[in-house]
Image: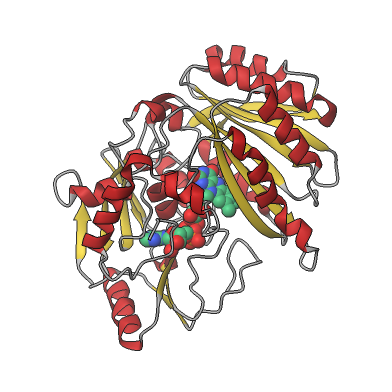
Amino acid sequence: MKVWNPAVDHQPAEVLVSATVDDVRAGLAKATAAGLGISVLGGGHDWLGRSVRHGGLVLDLSGMRTVTVSENIAVVGGGTRSLEVATIVEKAGGSVVAGTVGSVGVASFTTGGGYGYLNSLVGTGSDNLIAADVVLADGTLVHASEQEDSDLLWALRGGGGNFGVVTALHLRVHPLTTALTGMVAFSWDQAATVLRGFGEICAEAPDEFSARAGVVTLPGGPTVAYVAPAWMGNPADGEEWMGRVTRLGTPLIADLRIKPFSDVLREGEAMLAGNDHHHSMATRNIAALDPDVVAAIIEAAEARTSPASVIEIVQFHGAATRVPAEATAFAQRSPHFLIQLIGSWNPGDSAESQAWARDTSRKLAPYALPGGYPNVLGPDDKEQVAHAYGPNADRLLSLKRRYDPQSVFSASPLPY
Ligand SMILES: Cc1cc2nc3c(=O)[nH]c(=O)nc-3n(C[C@H](O)[C@H](O)[C@H](O)COP(=O)(O)OP(=O)(O)OC[C@H]3O[C@@H](n4cnc5c(N)ncnc54)[C@H](O)[C@@H]3O)c2cc1C
């Protein structure tokens, strides 16, 4: 079945589309009776295809795409995608924390951590999870909140969805619908200066500023170093910061405008359209973009075996870093840059193409913080997985034993 990464060729024994809690319960009972492993399909963006269990029963939550908003809380069905939520919440005058690609599933994005522009103002996606409805392996429906099953809520705030089927998320809505944002791209010969300068801007920026940067080859065009900043405060104050970004060099493209967050998700989605490359991903968290790190990134970009491969650098600072590491399962609280290495190749290309992301991750390891973003780590990243939950790993393990003692849900990279 088709998921984001065409390299995934898992063949499930059965796919059940679920629209209700009872559908989910029926699916779990059926899998148990047939002795089949289970997986839960949200937006299908896990690069390893962990939502489609080979030979197993897939609970496809595409029947649960619902959003209702009231009193600054959005209640979102477990299969809803980012753009669907953003569009409806925006009409109600607000935003939830989201990434930059519209088809990413909200449940896994949120329970895994959730990196997005709003992190610096209001925390991670998982910090903004107020409550969740979860069907456990035995079919029990649990409402995890600060008042009931608060341990489970703690675990779902960054520990992933491996405790049960999340059928609904209750997300905090913030009264902000637009940002001054867009993209500034520079020719490749300016890349080192631009990325070093980007690191300097990030080190000084207030919470209203949040940015991504990276290396991409434009369709049919040159390879560029880009910065995609967002200013989420008074637009007049943001001009200074946007000016600092455009003055990092001589831009080839400088397109910065006030736009709704839903447009950011639409544009991210459009960039993926028609892309049938196969992908392999790796990730590192880096504390600072110092000259050695920038040199390693430039070297990695030049070693890409395919122009479709991308390096993305996501700034993590501000409000999300002021939450204590043990307050929620998401433990990566020091300011950092999340580096996403997306290796892409045409089907049939050499094994060398497929190894680029992994090789690059190895080269960045000496500069990296321990751990990494669990939503992207894979089973081969044992060392990073071991550190990904920092001081929270033992508590997560004991909650896993309490809520899913038979390990029926085993798709995410939790260390069990
Ligand atoms: C193009 C692209 C852009 C991305 N951008 C960002 C970004 O900006 N910020 C960011 O933080 N991350 C980003 N990610 C990473 C993304 O958060 C993870 O890949 C996430 O797991 C995708 O969720 P999904 O529902 O789309 O995927 P799926 O493959 O459907 O699910 C991923 C995992 O979550 C489980 N799962 C899904 N839904 C549920 C549920 N309701 N209950 C229980 N378990 C569930 C699945 O079983 C599977 O193990 C991006 C990934 C891609 C490929």
Q: Position of residue 396 (x, y in %)?
A: 30, 51
Q: Is residue 196 above or below residue 338?
A: above
How is the structure coloured here?
secondary structure
Q: Residue at x 66, y 14 (%)?
A: 244
The number of numbered discs placed on residues in the rendered structure image is 0
Q: Position of residue 26 (x, y in %)?
A: 29, 79
Q: Residue at x 35, y 81 (%)?
A: 31
Of 154 and 66, the residue lying toward us: 154
Residue at the far bottom: name it: 34
Q: Is residue 265 above or below residue 8?
A: above
Using residue 278 as the reference point, say whether residue 120 is left or right of it. left
Q: Residue at x 71, y 34 (%)?
A: 296
Q: Residue at x 72, y 18 (%)?
A: 248
Using residue 322 as the reference point, say whether residue 291 is left or right of it. right
Using residue 118 as the reference point, say whether residue 25 is left or right of it. left
Q: Is residue 216 above or below residue 48?
A: above
Of 270 and 146, the residue lying toward us: 146
Tell me the quarter of the image containing the C terminus.
bottom left
Is residue 316 in view? no
Is residue 273 in view? yes
Q: Position of residue 211 (x, y in %)?
A: 57, 29
Of 382 and 326, the residue lying toward us: 382
